[in-house]
Amino acid sequence: MSIRLLEHLRDELIQTGIVQNTPEFCRSWLGRSEGYIRVLRYHQIEPSVETLTICSNKLGYYAARLNGSDAEDHEAWAAKLINLKSLCDSAIAKQAEAVWRAPERMAL
């Protein structure tokens, strides 16, 4: 699921012109190497919570900056970034819950 989330985030940012391609997205928005998504897919693993957190934080930062602008199109971009941040935050929460609900962690 989270790989698809990263691809969705990348596609949305490319569509708005914020990033140009996958390598730029991986480096600039995930803080990872340009082949990060490809490696995840190859090894069939999910992105780390750290990676999702970095992306969420950056989305929130730029949404706040755009919300402070007087330009009308900035308000729409901010709303889009806030929506994308919400998707990241949901994925983070889901992964965190999976950790604490693991049977070995639930035993008292």
Image (tube, grey):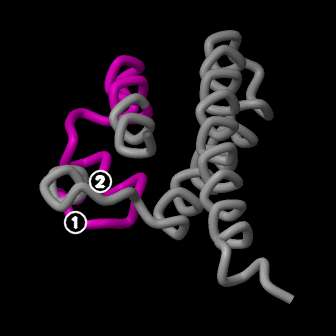
Answer with left or right where residue 8 lies relative to residue 82.
Answer: left
Q: Is residue 62 magenta?
A: no
Q: Earlier in the sequence, mark 2 or mark 1?
A: 2
Residue nearest the observer in this picture, 22 or 8: 8
The residue positioned 62% from the left and 36% from the top of the image is 87
Residue 61: percent from left, percent from top: 67, 50
Q: Which residue is mark 1?
A: 33
The residue positioned 75% from the left and 41% from the top of the image is 64
Q: Dot 2: few (<14), some (14–19), or many (≥20) neighbours within 10 Å? A: many
Residue 14: percent from left, percent from top: 32, 26
Residue 44: percent from left, percent from top: 24, 55
Task: Tell me if residue 63 comes above or below residue 89 in the rendering.
Answer: above
Discs 2, 1 touching: Cβ within 8 Å: yes
Q: Quadrant of the N terminus?
A: top left
Answer with left or right where residue 40 lies relative to residue 1.
Answer: left
Q: Is residue 14 magenta?
A: yes
The residue positioned 77% from the left and 21% from the top of the image is 70
Q: Quadrant of the C terminus?
A: bottom right
Q: CA distance from mark 2 to mark 1?
A: 6 Å
Helix, strand or loop at label 1? It is: loop
Q: Return the mark for residue 26.
A: 2
Task: Tell me if residue 5 comes above or below residue 71 in the rendering.
Answer: below
- In this picture, which residue range is highlighted in magenta? 9-36
Task: Tell me if residue 71 comes above or below residue 91 in the rendering.
Answer: above
